[in-house]
Amino acid sequence: SQKIEQNSEALNIQEGKTATLTCNYTNYSPAYLQWYRQDPGRGPVFLLLIRENEKEKRKERLKVTFDTTLKQSLFHITASQPADSATYLCAPGSGGYNKLIFGAGTRLAVHP
Amino acid sequence: GAVVSQHPSRVICKSGTSVKIECRSLDFQATTMFWYRQFPKKSLMLMATSNEGSKATYEQGVEKDKFLINHASLTLSTLTVTSAHPEDSSFYICSARDGGSKRAQETQYFGPGTRLLVL
């Protein structure tokens, strides 16, 4: 069955450093992969979408890579800030109408 | 753009009663909406996919008679938890897909969630 794996342990980093979160998937060939941010007690917020033919995508301090050979996506936040503290979810998808399957998410804590 | 609202944000009810949660896409037409359930510190669990004008598609293990879904218009889907019990207490989140281009449909826009507590 399709499986999405994200670091289950919280990631603690110092303010200003780069945070790197990992998303691995198995039994799946997604056409694209999305990253969402979720704050406690809130719904997820869409951040970035990267397609299978794109190696890297950037948006302000965010960078996402997508390696279809390794079946892995990396999510980077540069110059991290305490306001970046949240849970980050990855969700591979296939086709416009298919449902997304979400990973369990990685909790990021950025300390001043 | 792409705002999804949910109402109510929080509800407390007695065991045995039914609770209705509304999900609205405010600035786009959503041909497809999704309903998720999330337990504390756990991932989103898809309950059902709701398509406007047709019956919802439920995920395995989700009771369709207990979780009634109605997607009567392109901007509104409702989830009714019938005869709620304490084990139904959870965080319910809806999401919607823009019914525009195929690429627009790839992204899901989430509502803020509804916290249900059944006493």
Image (tube, coloured by chain):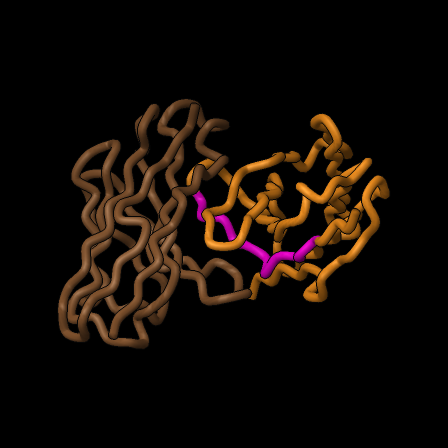
Q: Residue furthest front?
A: A112
Q: Quadrant of residue A33?
A: top right
Looking at the image, which residue is at 71% across and 62% down? Answer: A10
Q: How many marks?
A: 0
Let me know if residue B26 is in the magenta part: no
Residue A42 rendering spot, x and y as whole percentages: 46, 49
Looking at the image, which residue is at 81% across and 37% down? Answer: A78
The residue lying toward the viewer, choosing from A68 and A66, is A66
> Which one of the lettered chains is coloured orange?
A
Q: Is residue A38 left or right of residue B91?
A: right
Residue A22 rendering spot, x and y as whole percentages: 74, 53
Look at the image and give the residue range highlighted in magenta.
A98-108
Residue B71 position (above or below residue A62): below
Q: Colour of chain B?
A: brown
Q: Is residue B82 left or right of residue A45?
A: left
Looking at the image, which residue is at 38% across and 51% down? Answer: B93
Residue A59 position (above or below residue A8): above
Looking at the image, which residue is at 23% across and 62% down? Answer: B67
